[in-house]
Amino acid sequence: QVQLVESGGGLVQAGGSLRLSCAASRLTFSRYAMAWFRQAPGKEREFVAAISWSGGGTAYADSVKGRFTISRENAENTVYLQMNSLKPEDTAVYYCAADPRALAIVTMTLSVDYWGKGTLVTVSS
C-alpha cells in the first residue's frame, strides 16, 4: 500500500530552522499534489503548505507565509518543508499528505487520499 514517511522533526529553539522530509512509495508521485498539515495539542489539524504535482504552484497558510518553503523532488519521490524563524506556536505534529486533485482543493480539505504518520516539531521559547 501507499506509504508516506515523514522525518526531520525534533526540538529547536525559537528562531531556529528545521527541514522536514516526506518520502513516498507505491504511488505515482508526479501525479499527486503534496501537502503538509499540522496538529498542535488540543487543536484541530490545519493546512500548512502544498505544492502542485509539477512543483510549479505552491500555497501557504498565512501563519507560515514568508517563513516556510515547500519543495519537491519527483525523481526521488520526496517532498520537503523548510521551516525558518520558528516560533513556539509552530509546535505540532506535522503530517505529509498526498492527493491527486488540484492544488486549490488540497489547501481547503482534510479529506486527502493519503496521510503519513507524522513527525513532531517542538519549538522552545
Image: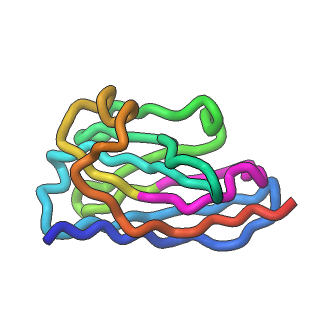
Spot occupied by residue 13 in the image (x, y as percentages of width and height): 81, 64
Q: Residue furthest top?
A: 104
What residue span does the magenta drawing correspond to? 81-95
Q: Is residue 30 left or right of residue 23?
A: left
Above-or-below relation of 93 to 52 = below
Q: Is residue 78 left or right of residue 71?
A: left
User: Camera-side residue: 49 or 84?
Assistant: 49
Q: Quadrant of the N terminus?
A: bottom left
Q: Is residue 67 left or right of residue 53?
A: right
Specify the quadrant of the image occupied by residue 122.
bottom right
Q: Residue at 75% of width from left, 62% of height from top?
A: 123
Residue 101 is a magenta residue: no
Spot occupied by residue 14 in the image (x, y as percentages of width and height): 81, 57
Q: Residue at 50% of width from left, 53% of height from top?
A: 81
Q: Is residue 125 left or right of residue 93?
A: right
Q: State the colouring used for the structure image.
A: rainbow
Above-or-below relation of 68 to 2 = above
User: Camera-side residue: 86 or 37?
Assistant: 37
Q: Residue at 60% of width from left, 49% of height from top?
A: 43
Q: Residue at 68% of width from left, 51% of height from top?
A: 90
Q: Residue furthest right?
A: 125
Q: Quadrant of the C terminus?
A: bottom right
Spot occupied by residue 27 in the image (x, y as percentages of width and height): 14, 61
Spot occupied by residue 18 in the image (x, y as percentages of width and height): 63, 62
